[in-house]
Amino acid sequence: MTRKLIAVLALVPCLALATIFSIGAGAVEIEPAQVISILRSLVGLEGFQDYSPQQAAVLEAIRLPRVLLGLLIGAGLSTAGAAMQGLYRNPLADPGLLGISSGASVLAAASIVLEIHWFGIYTLPIAAFCGSLLAMSVVYLLSQYQGRTQITTLLLAGIAISALCGAVTGFFTYFSNDDQLRSITFWQLGSLGGATWSALFSVAPFILLTVMGIPFFAKALNALLLGESNAKYLGIPVERVKVVLILLVALGVGAGVAVAGLIGFVGLVVPHLVRLSLGPDHRFLLPASALLGSLLLVLADLIARTIVSPLELPIGIVTASVGSPFFLFLLLRDRKMGGL
Amino acid sequence: MSLLKAQDLSFQVKERYLLQHVGFSVEPGEFLAVIGRNGAGKTTLLRLLTNDLTPKTGKIEIFGRPLAEFAQKDLATKRAVLAQSTPLNFAFEVLEVVLLGRIPHERTASSFEQDLEIAMAALAQVGLQGFERRNYLTLSGGEQQRVQLARTLCQIATDSPERLLFLDEPTSSLDVSHQHRVLETAKKICHEGAGVFAILHDINLAAQYADKVLILAGGRKVAFGPTADVLKADILSAAFQHNIMVTDHPRLNCKLIVTC
């Protein structure tokens, strides 16, 4: 109990260090002490290290919103992933199963190929958000039967709707020209490159709601691991819990996908990593997943924007290529201990 | 006051009756076994009693009050249900699984230390002390079932005499030794005044452990009463539509059921 609490809390300083380091790294280098000084000056406190106005401008306009967006999206995807895995009682579940990602893809691709610009530069994120909520709602409605949410149907409907969305996205891709094809592909690989303060502020409420709301259901999720009827016998209002959790996941992930595209792997793997060391108790799993997800996404974005600079890799390439071998290593190492 | 009382329960899906005019009661300290063929309505009865289904007609009283009056949360502090199998495939430690039984008590005064004590006692009751830190997924099926039994005991561990344990074929997939350990534990909490409602497949287990037996066939009550009065060759043969003989157990003071 105490050991687990310490492990969760130990993630906080790690995250702070990664954040400061990540803000400092890039074409315009900023020392950690300078980063802290500039951050202090932003909130009206005295700095203790000299820095140039250029450094301050880069930090404020480019680096800070980007890193904060990474923190938010990492936490959102991981918390949502942990909640989905608990809800489905399947460690392989991820938020994509609700049709969120594929739904977002359809309207994102549509807005690119049909050259829709109704909302200026926000057209793509708005389209993606609408797409994810739309697909998600269809999946959810399909899973309703006699006033109950059938989790198995939810899963299968999610897969079916995802496949359908994939077909429609493929259709748009087929008719796209080279530039549009490039945009679609890049969007699908995910990127934090579009981070601005306004983008950050528009998605922050949704994602924060997810990250802070889901942990209130930690005990309910623990009980749900015993199956729905057992959870009910333990006094958990199962139907209400399911609906609220699905809603929280949909909003948080939908908002994340809207501004950063499809960042795979994080929602699936981060909760796994936490479970390997802390066990499946959601009271620790959820906050630890949020922190570790933030940490990993900030580091992944750091790699994505520095490794081939001045170019930028899509972050999805980094999360998958660095994460999967590491994940496999853990999986094989812990296989003897009864798996996940 | 009966811990559990059902009167004239009926349940139907469309035109087909799954249960018709079933009535019985469980008094404090009593072990009731429900037996019958597959499809006789045992599971339907359990689902009515746990409020998963709503009866078409009839009354269910639990702890002297109508079942529908109870909030799910309050009921969960004194009524627990152990299913035939529990679909848990996450690597909890054994003690963590048992502690899940304390979830309904979170808003009462019980502290974490108290909960821990109760959980340890429950583990000892099912004979699994020393298993606290073991990974649940590495246990055998019989051990897992006993951990789940400990969880349900932990759930209804209160000072109140109002305690009910529902067992839904708790021993069907267990070996002989585990079967008896599970039912011995259930019997023990009967001696402390709790009531047990157990759906059993093995009539001999009912003969050994039950105070009363309810026999269902085709959704109807065939017999209900003290074990020795109800477990008769003619009644059982008719209910199971199979030749069944009843004799005295050579060692124990109970009936021995022989199929032929």
Image (cartoon, coloured by chain):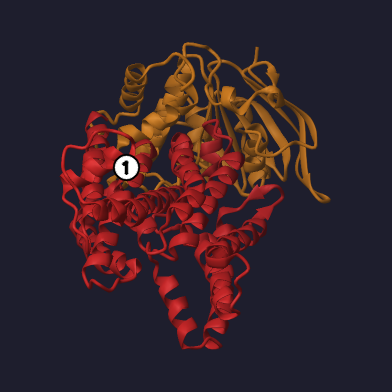
Residue that appears at 42% across and 50% down: A76
- Image position of A3 (left or right of A165): left
- Residue A102, given in percent of the width and then of the height, sits at 52, 68
User: In which quadrant of the rendered view does residue B54 lie?
Assistant: top right
Residue that appears at 48% across and 53% down: A198
Q: Amino acid at mark 1?
A: Ala
The answer to whether residue B252 is seen in the rendering is: no
Please tell me how many numbered marks the rendered image carries: 1
- Image position of A30 (left or right of A233): left
- Residue B117, given in percent of the width and then of the height, sits at 32, 19
The answer to which of A213 and A185 lies nearer the viewer is: A185
The answer to whether residue B231 is seen in the rendering is: yes
Residue that appears at 28% across and 39% down: A41
Vertical side of A59 occupied by B142: above or below? above
Chain drawn red in the picture: A
The answer to which of A131 and B178 lies nearer the viewer is: A131
Vertical side of A338 occupied by B188: above or below? above
- Residue A237, given in percent of the width and then of the height, sits at 58, 35
Residue that appears at 60% across and 38% down: B35
Looking at the rendered image, the quarter that the N terminus of chain A falls into is top left
- Residue A267, given in percent of the width and then of the height, sits at 39, 56
Category of crowding for the residue at label 1, using alpha-carbon neighbours closer than 10 angstroms: few (below 14), some (14–19), many (at least 20):
many
Chain identity of mark 1: A
The answer to which of A1 and B182 lies nearer the viewer is: A1
Callout 1: helix, strand or loop? helix
- Image position of A322 (left or right of A236): left
Vertical side of A3 occupied by A189: above or below? below
Vertical side of A101 occupied by B12: above or below? above
Q: Which residue is mark 1?
A: A288
User: In which quadrant of the rendered view does residue A282 lie?
Assistant: top left
Furthest toward the right, the residue is B15
Chain drawn orange in the picture: B
